[in-house]
Protein backbone atom coordinates (compact mmCIF):
# COMPACT_ATOMS: atom_id res chain seq x y z
CA UNK A 1 0.00 0.00 0.00
CA UNK A 2 1.10 3.53 -0.78
CA UNK A 3 2.33 5.29 2.35
CA UNK A 4 -0.32 7.99 2.71
CA UNK A 5 -1.61 9.10 6.08
CA UNK A 6 -4.45 11.54 6.53
CA UNK A 7 -5.15 13.22 9.82
CA UNK A 8 -7.45 13.54 11.55
CA UNK A 9 -9.60 10.67 10.33
CA UNK A 10 -12.75 12.18 11.78
CA UNK A 11 -13.57 15.69 12.90
CA UNK A 12 -16.65 17.51 14.07
CA UNK A 13 -16.51 21.27 14.30
CA UNK A 14 -18.72 24.32 14.26
CA UNK A 15 -19.52 26.74 11.49
CA UNK A 16 -17.05 29.58 11.28
CA UNK A 17 -14.09 27.79 12.80
CA UNK A 18 -10.86 27.17 10.90
CA UNK A 19 -9.99 23.57 10.10
CA UNK A 20 -6.77 22.08 8.77
CA UNK A 21 -6.47 18.60 7.34
CA UNK A 22 -3.09 17.00 6.85
CA UNK A 23 -1.85 14.57 4.25
CA UNK A 24 1.52 12.93 4.81
CA UNK A 25 3.23 10.65 2.28
CA UNK A 26 6.34 8.53 2.49
CA UNK A 27 6.60 7.80 -1.25
CA UNK A 28 8.46 10.97 -2.23
CA UNK A 29 5.92 11.57 -5.00
CA UNK A 30 5.88 15.01 -6.55
CA UNK A 31 2.14 15.33 -7.19
CA UNK A 32 -0.44 15.57 -4.45
CA UNK A 33 -4.17 16.21 -4.64
CA UNK A 34 -7.09 17.00 -2.38
CA UNK A 35 -10.54 15.73 -3.37
CA UNK A 36 -13.89 15.84 -1.67
CA UNK A 37 -16.50 13.11 -1.98
CA UNK A 38 -20.19 13.85 -1.74
CA UNK A 39 -23.16 11.60 -2.52
CA UNK A 40 -24.15 11.82 -6.16
CA UNK A 41 -20.96 13.66 -7.16
CA UNK A 42 -18.18 11.14 -7.08
CA UNK A 43 -14.86 12.76 -6.18
CA UNK A 44 -14.11 16.35 -7.13
CA UNK A 45 -10.72 18.03 -7.12
CA UNK A 46 -10.24 20.88 -4.64
CA UNK A 47 -6.56 21.76 -5.01
CA UNK A 48 -3.42 20.06 -6.18
CA UNK A 49 0.33 20.45 -5.85
CA UNK A 50 3.04 19.77 -8.39
CA UNK A 51 5.94 20.41 -6.07
CA UNK A 52 7.04 22.14 -2.90
CA UNK A 53 5.31 25.53 -2.73
CA UNK A 54 3.71 24.88 -6.13
CA UNK A 55 -0.06 24.60 -5.86
CA UNK A 56 -3.09 25.40 -7.95
CA UNK A 57 -6.87 25.32 -7.84
CA UNK A 58 -9.16 22.51 -8.83
CA UNK A 59 -12.83 22.64 -9.75
CA UNK A 60 -14.26 23.25 -6.25
CA UNK A 61 -11.61 25.42 -4.60
CA UNK A 62 -13.77 28.21 -3.15
CA UNK A 63 -13.42 28.35 0.63
CA UNK A 64 -10.27 26.23 0.69
CA UNK A 65 -6.57 26.95 0.73
CA UNK A 66 -3.57 24.64 0.66
CA UNK A 67 0.10 24.68 1.49
CA UNK A 68 3.02 22.44 0.74
CA UNK A 69 6.22 23.36 2.53
CA UNK A 70 7.74 19.88 2.30
CA UNK A 71 7.49 17.13 -0.29
CA UNK A 72 5.82 14.81 2.16
CA UNK A 73 3.12 17.11 3.55
CA UNK A 74 0.12 18.72 1.88
CA UNK A 75 -2.25 20.70 4.08
CA UNK A 76 -5.83 21.64 3.30
CA UNK A 77 -7.32 24.54 5.25
CA UNK A 78 -10.91 25.65 5.56
CA UNK A 79 -10.50 29.24 6.68
CA UNK A 80 -14.04 29.56 8.03
CA UNK A 81 -15.89 26.28 7.81
CA UNK A 82 -19.44 26.18 6.48
CA UNK A 83 -22.01 23.40 6.59
CA UNK A 84 -21.64 22.92 2.83
CA UNK A 85 -18.09 21.76 3.46
CA UNK A 86 -19.30 18.74 5.39
CA UNK A 87 -17.84 15.95 3.32
CA UNK A 88 -15.31 13.16 3.12
CA UNK A 89 -11.89 14.48 2.07
CA UNK A 90 -9.34 12.37 0.27
CA UNK A 91 -5.72 13.05 -0.36
CA UNK A 92 -4.09 11.39 -3.37
CA UNK A 93 -0.54 11.15 -4.64
CA UNK A 94 0.96 10.41 -8.02
CA UNK A 95 4.49 9.79 -9.18
CA UNK A 96 4.02 11.71 -12.41
CA UNK A 97 1.44 13.50 -14.51
CA UNK A 98 1.43 10.81 -17.16
CA UNK A 99 -2.03 9.51 -17.91
CA UNK A 100 -0.99 5.93 -17.24
CA UNK A 101 -0.11 6.72 -13.65
CA UNK A 102 -2.83 5.93 -11.14
CA UNK A 103 -3.37 8.19 -8.20
CA UNK A 104 -3.19 6.45 -4.87
CA UNK A 105 -5.45 7.59 -2.11
CA UNK A 106 -5.30 8.00 1.63
CA UNK A 107 -8.06 6.56 3.81
CA UNK A 108 -10.02 9.80 3.92
CA UNK A 109 -11.09 12.31 6.56
CA UNK A 110 -14.74 12.52 7.50
CA UNK A 111 -15.49 16.15 8.35
CA UNK A 112 -18.78 17.30 9.86
CA UNK A 113 -19.53 20.98 10.28
CA UNK A 114 -22.45 21.78 12.52
CA UNK B 1 -13.70 18.90 -20.87
CA UNK B 2 -13.70 15.36 -19.64
CA UNK B 3 -16.81 13.58 -18.47
CA UNK B 4 -17.46 10.16 -17.01
CA UNK B 5 -20.95 8.68 -16.92
CA UNK B 6 -22.01 5.82 -14.70
CA UNK B 7 -25.77 5.46 -14.80
CA UNK B 8 -26.48 1.95 -13.58
CA UNK B 9 -28.58 1.74 -10.45
CA UNK B 10 -27.38 -0.50 -7.68
CA UNK B 11 -26.18 -3.78 -9.13
CA UNK B 12 -26.69 -7.22 -7.66
CA UNK B 13 -24.84 -10.40 -8.58
CA UNK B 14 -24.82 -13.93 -7.26
CA UNK B 15 -21.58 -15.13 -5.74
CA UNK B 16 -19.29 -16.84 -8.29
CA UNK B 17 -21.03 -15.23 -11.25
CA UNK B 18 -19.56 -12.55 -13.50
CA UNK B 19 -20.79 -8.96 -13.52
CA UNK B 20 -20.23 -5.98 -15.82
CA UNK B 21 -20.19 -2.42 -14.53
CA UNK B 22 -20.75 0.18 -17.21
CA UNK B 23 -18.75 3.33 -17.84
CA UNK B 24 -18.93 5.75 -20.73
CA UNK B 25 -16.69 8.73 -21.16
CA UNK B 26 -16.31 11.84 -23.21
CA UNK B 27 -13.15 13.72 -24.06
CA UNK B 28 -11.64 15.61 -26.96
CA UNK B 29 -8.12 14.47 -26.07
CA UNK B 30 -6.72 11.66 -28.23
CA UNK B 31 -4.51 10.51 -25.36
CA UNK B 32 -6.04 9.56 -22.03
CA UNK B 33 -6.11 6.92 -19.34
CA UNK B 34 -9.07 5.15 -17.83
CA UNK B 35 -9.11 3.78 -14.31
CA UNK B 36 -11.40 1.84 -12.05
CA UNK B 37 -11.37 2.21 -8.29
CA UNK B 38 -13.14 0.22 -5.62
CA UNK B 39 -14.49 1.79 -2.45
CA UNK B 40 -15.61 -0.75 0.15
CA UNK B 41 -17.80 0.23 3.07
CA UNK B 42 -14.67 0.98 5.11
CA UNK B 43 -14.17 3.99 2.83
CA UNK B 44 -10.74 3.67 1.27
CA UNK B 45 -10.23 4.07 -2.48
CA UNK B 46 -8.47 1.10 -4.04
CA UNK B 47 -6.99 1.25 -7.54
CA UNK B 48 -8.07 -1.79 -9.58
CA UNK B 49 -7.15 -1.49 -13.23
CA UNK B 50 -5.89 0.87 -15.92
CA UNK B 51 -6.51 1.12 -19.68
CA UNK B 52 -4.66 3.48 -21.99
CA UNK B 53 -6.37 5.05 -24.96
CA UNK B 54 -3.76 3.63 -27.34
CA UNK B 55 -3.68 0.17 -25.82
CA UNK B 56 -4.61 -2.46 -28.39
CA UNK B 57 -5.53 -5.09 -25.85
CA UNK B 58 -8.09 -4.95 -23.08
CA UNK B 59 -6.49 -4.65 -19.68
CA UNK B 60 -6.72 -7.52 -17.23
CA UNK B 61 -5.74 -7.75 -13.59
CA UNK B 62 -6.62 -11.00 -11.89
CA UNK B 63 -10.41 -11.30 -11.79
CA UNK B 64 -10.81 -7.80 -13.22
CA UNK B 65 -10.85 -7.02 -16.89
CA UNK B 66 -11.72 -3.91 -18.79
CA UNK B 67 -13.91 -4.14 -21.88
CA UNK B 68 -12.58 -1.14 -23.80
CA UNK B 69 -14.57 -0.02 -26.84
CA UNK B 70 -12.92 3.13 -28.03
CA UNK B 71 -15.37 3.96 -30.82
CA UNK B 72 -18.24 3.73 -28.37
CA UNK B 73 -16.27 5.56 -25.69
CA UNK B 74 -16.99 2.87 -23.17
CA UNK B 75 -14.74 1.24 -20.58
CA UNK B 76 -16.76 -1.37 -18.75
CA UNK B 77 -15.33 -3.26 -15.80
CA UNK B 78 -15.90 -7.01 -15.78
CA UNK B 79 -15.51 -8.89 -12.51
CA UNK B 80 -15.36 -12.62 -12.94
CA UNK B 81 -16.25 -15.16 -10.26
CA UNK B 82 -17.71 -12.58 -7.87
CA UNK B 83 -16.86 -12.87 -4.21
CA UNK B 84 -18.65 -11.47 -1.18
CA UNK B 85 -15.73 -9.11 -0.68
CA UNK B 86 -16.46 -7.51 -4.04
CA UNK B 87 -19.47 -5.76 -2.51
CA UNK B 88 -18.50 -2.11 -2.73
CA UNK B 89 -18.93 1.07 -4.70
CA UNK B 90 -16.99 1.21 -7.96
CA UNK B 91 -15.79 4.37 -9.63
CA UNK B 92 -14.68 4.87 -13.19
CA UNK B 93 -12.21 7.71 -13.72
CA UNK B 94 -10.30 9.35 -16.53
CA UNK B 95 -6.97 11.14 -16.65
CA UNK B 96 -6.05 13.33 -19.60
CA UNK B 97 -2.69 14.11 -21.14
CA UNK B 98 0.04 15.54 -18.87
CA UNK B 99 -1.37 19.01 -18.56
CA UNK B 100 -1.81 21.59 -15.90
CA UNK B 101 -3.02 19.21 -13.24
CA UNK B 102 -3.75 15.90 -14.94
CA UNK B 103 -6.51 15.39 -12.43
CA UNK B 104 -8.74 12.38 -12.28
CA UNK B 105 -12.30 13.00 -13.40
CA UNK B 106 -14.63 10.59 -11.63
CA UNK B 107 -18.04 9.21 -12.38
CA UNK B 108 -20.66 9.11 -9.65
CA UNK B 109 -20.06 5.45 -8.92
CA UNK B 110 -22.00 2.20 -8.98
CA UNK B 111 -22.91 0.15 -5.92
CA UNK B 112 -22.36 -3.58 -6.32
CA UNK B 113 -23.85 -6.10 -3.91
CA UNK B 114 -22.79 -9.73 -4.09
CA UNK B 115 -25.36 -12.22 -2.84
CA UNK B 116 -24.31 -15.51 -1.22
Image: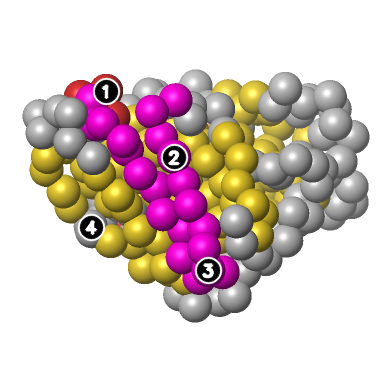
Is the residue under label 2 in contact with that under label 3 (CB below 8 Å)?
no
Measure how far apart labels 4 and 3 are at the Cα level. Answer: 21 Å
Please give the residue where the numbered disc 3 appears in the rendered image. A70
Please give the residue where the numbered disc 2 appears in the rendered image. A65
**Frontmost residue, B5 versus B10:** B5
Q: Quadrant of residue B16?
A: bottom left
| Residue at image coords 46%, 46% | A66
Residue range of the region highlighted in magenta in the rendering: A62-82
Asked if residue B35 is positioned above or below residue A23 in the image, the reply reads above
Share a chain, discs 3 and 2?
A: yes
Q: Earlier in the sequence, mark 2 or mark 1?
A: 2
Q: Earlier in the sequence, mark 4 or mark 3?
A: 4
Q: Position of residue B113 (x, y in %)?
A: 31, 43
The 10 Å Cα crowd at callout 2, few under 14, some 14 to 19, many 20 or more, is: some
The answer to whether residue B49 shows anywhere in this view is no
What secondary structure is found at the residue carrying circle 2?
strand
Amino acid sequence: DAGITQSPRHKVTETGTPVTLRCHQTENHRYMYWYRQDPGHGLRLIHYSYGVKDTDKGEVSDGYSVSRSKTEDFLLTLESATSSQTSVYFCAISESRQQNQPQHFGDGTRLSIL
Amino acid sequence: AQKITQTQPGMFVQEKEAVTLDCTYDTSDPSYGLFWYKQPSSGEMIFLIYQGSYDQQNATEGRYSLNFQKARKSANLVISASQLGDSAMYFCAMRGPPGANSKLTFGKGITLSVRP
